[in-house]
Amino acid sequence: MTAPLDWRVSRRSLLKTAALGAVAVGGAPLLSACGGSSGIETSATAPAGSPKRGGNLRVGIVGGGAKDTVDAHLPVSHPDEARVFALYDSLLTRNPDYSIRPALAESLTPSSDPRTWTLKLRQGVTFHNGKPLTVDDVSFTFQRILDPKSPKSQATALSIIDLEALKKVDDHTLAIGLKSPSVILDDHLTNYAAGIVPAGYDPAKPVGTGPFKFQSFTPGQQSVFVRNDSYWQSGQPYADQLTIIDFPDDTARVNALLSGQVDVIDQVPLGQLAVVKANPGLRVLESETGAWIPFTMRVDAAPFSDVRVRQALRLLVDRQQMVDQVLSGHGKIGNDLYAPFDPMFARDLPQRHQDLDQAKSLLRQAGHSDLRVELVTSEVAAGTVEAAQVFARQAQDAGVTVKLKKVDSGVFYGDNYLKWDFAQDFWFTRNYLPQVAQGSLPTSPYNETHWKDPTFIDLVTRAGSTVDEAKRRQLLHDAQKIEHDSGGYIIWSFTNQVDAHSSKVNGLVPDKSGIPLTSYGFGRMWLG
């Protein structure tokens, strides 16, 4: 990954439509409840009583491998992300209804331009090693993420920060100068890959401010954490120990839940949902989200380098059938665009439907009437393999042969990750500009489609610094139309998040982020 730091739009944040004055977060309540969430919770027994301390919370997660990490700023797989949530805190975070709330920040307020943001840091917070949190640690974190020799996954998003313009006012106040105005810095700082680490941080000895402290880690197998008794969120965490277990496949993970070997699993395979629901000792937690599991076509590799081929493959998809068969109805159809919760989502673009005649015509024009492609699939997220299978069947109706190459998650995230010509991936809920920064720019760390449209780049760059809401909306709609017309994603749905847990586990609520298990909220879970 290379991430030049001269790009002016950050990634992976919420595009705010509120007036600038509304972006300050000071005074907002911590740990607000699930107000406004449109999620769905199915429980055998409703949680009751006060949280209890103690026990070993055992969590089964799919998708890890030999390249697993505990680095605060390099999470890739679901197990990585779960570990990040256990160990670290970001300055801001999100409520289950996807609104922003303060975490390590007490407030973050923009200037009127908005070229400088003032951070007020929460006082009394300590790292796992006992060191008090100060703005020196925040500055170190920014420098580590933006290190030009080793940029981390949030480097493009935070590249708007001018490291030379960080001004320490006192131990808990930092003026954050930007290279160019940004209306969404707060949104970028909610990202779980922007966790604050202490100055001198060494990922081999991971230290954060999170609810659990590191104890042991075996990549692709298991990681163990113990309770942080000095955690800044009053009363949390409740479990004495957290054990995250990687599973290579869904069947083993569900069996582990059914047999009581684990207490919680994320992403229940929907084909086994009935089995889980039938067990009176288990609960299912379902949330409507903006998460998506796209097919990814490299726009710089034949035959996908021909836009007519990409358009044709999008027209092969019967999206409702995909939702019905792959997700058992637990989701909504997509329109080859992401960020449906963004207030500036281009809802007026025509919904794309299956059109086999048009697809065949485009393929003939492109000289690929007998198209044969290989699709790389893996159980990196619930429904990916099933989606690949259904897509291959649908493609047959247009004379397109899709050969499936199923690999384990370790291979998928191995040396060829982000190089597959035609593959899949998973993404959590994000708004448009943050998602663009993560995956749709040449500097993006996860640009799996190798998308680099100059007009698109110009539009999103200008949008990120445009204060006027109407002008920003037009820029973003123009950018979305380009992706809708010629991008490299096939986005066929937005999936509901479906997790499961023992009825002994409490504290989970529906969450719109798409991040499993209430954004891996291990600190709030307790064993009854």
Image (cartoon, rainbow, N blue to C red):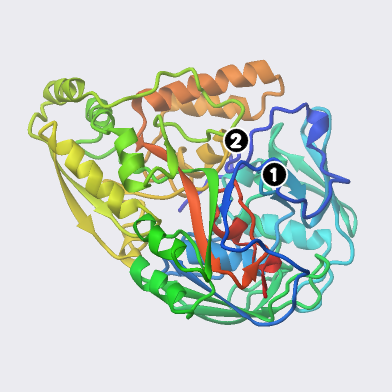
Residue at left offset 61%, top offset 73%? 504
Comparing 32 with 133, the one in front is 32
The answer to whether 191 is drawn above or below residue 332 in the figure is below
Q: Residues within 10 Å of mark 2 (few under 14, many from 20)?
A: many
Q: Which residue does the numbered mark 2 point to in the structure image? A: 9
Q: Are marks 1 and 2 in contact (CB under 8 Å)?
A: no
In the picture of the structure, the residue carrying the numbered disc 1 is 161
Q: Which residue: 71% across, 31% down?
A: 181
Residue at 63%, 21% in the rendered image: 472
Disc 2 residue type? Val
Residue occupying image coordinates x 10% and y 34%: 399
Give the secondary structure at mark 2.
loop
Q: Position of residue 241 (x, y in %)?
A: 64, 81
Q: Is residue 66 visible?
A: no
Q: Which mark is residue 438?
A: none
> In this image, 154 relative to 336: left or right?
right
Which amino acid, mark 1?
Ile
Coordinates of residue 248 in the picture (x, y in percent) = 36, 71
